[in-house]
Image: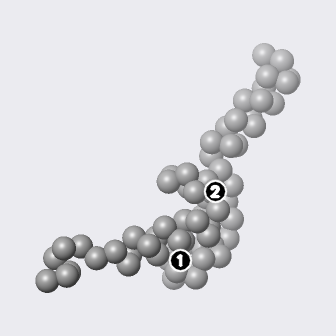
Amino acid sequence: MSFAAGNDLQNNKEKSVGRCEPIKVGLCKDLPYNETRMPNFMNHTNQEDAGMEVSLKSNKRGPSLID
C-alpha cells in the first residue's frame, strides 16, 4: 500500500466516524454528556438540523393524545 492510498483510507475512516463537538443546542444541554458527533446516526451534518428534527418530533401528537 502506498502512502497516498493509506492516507485516503484514513480520510475515509475519519469521514465515516464524524467529528466530536461540544453540544450547542439548548434542547440537548441537559443530557448526561456534553459532546456529540456530526454527522450523527441520522446523518444530520450539524446540530441545528438535529435539534430542529427532535423538536418537531417531540411536538407531534399521537391519536391517543388528541382524545
Image quadrant holding the C terminus, namely bottom left
Q: Name the secondary structure under disc 2.
A: loop
Q: Is residue 46 above or below residue 32?
A: above
Q: What amino acid is at disc 2?
A: Thr
Residue in view at x 81 percent, y 30 percent: 7
Q: Which mark is residue 17?
A: none
Q: What amino acid is at disc 1?
A: Cys
Residue in view at x 24 percent, y 73 percent: 62
N-terminal of the pair, mark 1 or mark 2, is 1
Disc 1: which residue: 28
Point out residue 27 in the picture as x, y percentages from the top left corner.
Answer: 52, 80
Q: Name the secondary structure under disc 1.
A: helix
Q: Going by the image, does 33 lie left or right of 2?
A: left
Q: CA distance from mark 1 to mark 2?
A: 16 Å
Q: Residue furthest right?
A: 3
Point out residue 56 in the picture as x, y percentages from the top left corner.
Answer: 44, 73
Q: Residue furthest top?
A: 1
Q: Is residue 20 above or below residue 12?
A: below
Residue in view at x 62 percent, y 46 percent: 17
Q: Going by the image, does 61 lie left or right of 17?
A: left
Foreground: disc 1 or disc 2: 2
Q: Nearer the viewer, residue 56 or 36?
A: 56
| Quarter holding residue 5 | top right
| Quarter holding residue 15 | top right
| Quarter holding residue 16 | top right
Disc 2: which residue: 45
Badge 2 local density, few (<14 within 10 Å), some, or many (20+)?
Answer: some
Point out residue 37 in the picture as x, y percentages from the top left corner.
Answer: 61, 58
Residue in view at x 55 percent, y 65 percent: 50
